[in-house]
Image (cartoon, rainbow, N blue to C red):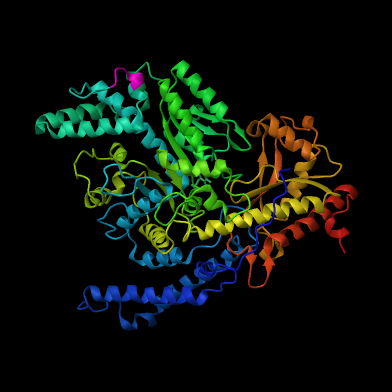
Amino acid sequence: MSAAVPMPTPEPRDHTLDACFLGPYGENDALLERLMVEFLRDHVYWRRNFHPEDPPAIATAAAHHPDYLAFEARMRRELHQLSAALKKSVPFHSPRYIGHMASDLLLPGLAAQMLTLPYNPNNVSEDAAPVTVDMEVQVGLQLARMLGYPHDPAQPACAFGHLASGGSLANYQALRLALALKAFPVALRAAGVPELALPVDDWSAFNLAAADTIVLLEQWHAWLAAQSPEQRAHWLTRVEAERIEQRGLVGFFAAHPELRVPLVLAPVTAHYSWSKGLKLLGLGREQLHLLPTCGMRLDLAALRDTLARCAHERQPVLMCVAVLGSTEYGTIDPIDAVLAARAHARTQGVDFSVHVDAAWGGYLATLFRHEDGSLRSRAEVASDYVQFPTPAVHAAFAALADTDSATVDPHKLGYLPYGAGAFICRDHRAMALLAERADYVFHGSTPDSYLARYRSLGQFVPEGSKSGAAAAAVYVTHKVLPLDHRHFGRLPRATVRAAEAFHACAQRFALDIADQLHVLVPFAPDSNLVCLALNPRGSHSVAQANAYVRALHDTLRCDPSQPLQTKEFFGSVTSLRPQMLGAADTARILAALQLDPHSLTPDEGSDRLVILRHTLMNPYLIDHENGISYIERYFEFLGHRARALAVTASTGIPADRSLP
Ligand SMILES: *Cc1c(COP(=O)(O)O)cnc(C)c1O
């Protein structure tokens, strides 16, 4: 086990956090109710003031008609049934919920979303969302600033971001953009555009750095603008006909037989949306090359070897995905080193995009930003924590600014309602390649022209109609809590501190229960997910350990057949597979749990080690008001359960009967 982790020093309640959420007990009910009533009335006045001369179309007496009453009764009945059924929902708001990546909702976002819903804006374009589409573009800039991307729309190379239904869709958008950038110089060559300095062959065109492709794109636009209308139309058609978006993968690669379908490199810890994305784009899952990890962080030696082999075999690479906060373990890939590996691959003629999948960890970047947007040093960040951030974690966040694109989920660590993921690319000019209608119209580069262009959001995003209310929720939240360490950062700060307290408690738990169980935090947490591996004393087989952890997890998971109140705590499970962990870590973890390495077999049930996984994102894990630590209570509960289960395991008597 890693060296003993001290508890973070207790500190007084951060009173800003008190107003942020409805609260575990619904403490802020009056505040939310006031807001909802106020803004519902406001909406009604807006309707009435549209054309005050139009009289009410629904008769004043309509509410007494039997049909009206029958409809109302049916509606009420169904709503009551819905409300009753929803009582079986997962209590994400509770500090007893430390399972998946969900928690309470931020009041500014919840209120903004509910207040916007009756206006029903559609962010597909400004025609359907004159207000919220601008907010969505602003959200892109807010997130760009958080990541360290250029975020001034007066600058030609400003970033651009938009919302999507979730991180999965944002990841598909990243693939789409990377492919468009990669294939465009090849199309320019194939079309034989004169007077542009084009790469000498298809291989170098397919391996042009994204920044160089953007320069080429700008030159192409300038060249087009200088042509006569007939010539312009002619060349536009000719280039469009050569683009991968026009020809499709089959036609494009048939026309360029020396090019192979490019690979996507990602760590084995990557989210399964990457597999879905490769299927969706028609690249095929075979092109997803999963790299091994060290301590659940991308293994650099493996990345370098793969890139060297790609250079040698002339195998193009579309993208390397670095994960900032893996879904299962919260671990953070060495983004700085991935960028360095790309810089080296460039010298061998292989180039690709670096995309950061920060769907989970994106908002942790607020911890690393001063209010003026500059980066905080490691020492500045570290003063609030026991161990966080390790030098590697700080370097990863510092390197975000140099990546090509990122996915961030406001509906995860942004504490906002579902339906809000985000895609952000560092240089918005690349987006011209995704436009559904050839986007060669010049707007210049002023904040106005930038906004004007992206008000036709539907031209650039994978979706069509999309929620303007979700955009309002994210925008308002980022205004109330700007994305720096003093504002929004208070939330991730509380969660990282909670994770450190959890880690320290886990180590104490391991000592206290050592007579019954081997307990291990398998790798030091990078952020706010903490895993726990357990094996009862006397058990030496992975299958037995897994059965034990699954039985333990049965008491920690959602069970719709039981009243919610019978659950003390909610946790989740994940697993450690040797091909993910690597040989050294696998041996270390099995040895610490006194598990026989030979019991790890290819059979289902023993091919991986099942472990508990805890997401520490609830802001009320430490209840300062009543002096309760739900983290300590969790370990007390786990201790009781674990001992009872161990008794069952050794006596065969079900634990519940052996308890008084
Ligand atoms: C959650 C997650 C995703 C997928 O995001 P959705 O919003 O669920 O579509 C992708 N990548 C990572 C790292 C995630 O944690």
Total numbered labels placed on residues in the image:
0
56 over 630 or under it: above or below: below
Q: Residue furthest right?
A: 651
- 627 magenta-colored: no
Toward the viewer: 535 or 544?
535
> Is residue 203 in the magenta section?
yes
Specify whether residue 495 is in view. yes
Q: Is residue 318 left or right of residue 195?
A: right
Which quadrant: the N terminus? top right
**Above/below status of 7 relative to 586:** below
Q: Which residues are magenta?
A: 199-204
| Residue 350 in sight here | no
Q: In x, y percent, where is residue 236?
A: 19, 31
Q: Quadrant of the C terminus?
A: bottom right
Residue displayed at 35% across by 51% down: 141
Q: Position of residue 217 (x, y in %)?
A: 26, 32
> Residue 52 is drawn in which quadrant?
bottom left
**Residue 424, x across and y down, in percent:** 39, 45
Measured as percent of width and height from the top left, residue 630 is found at 68, 63
Question: Residue at image x 32%, y 83%?
Answer: 60
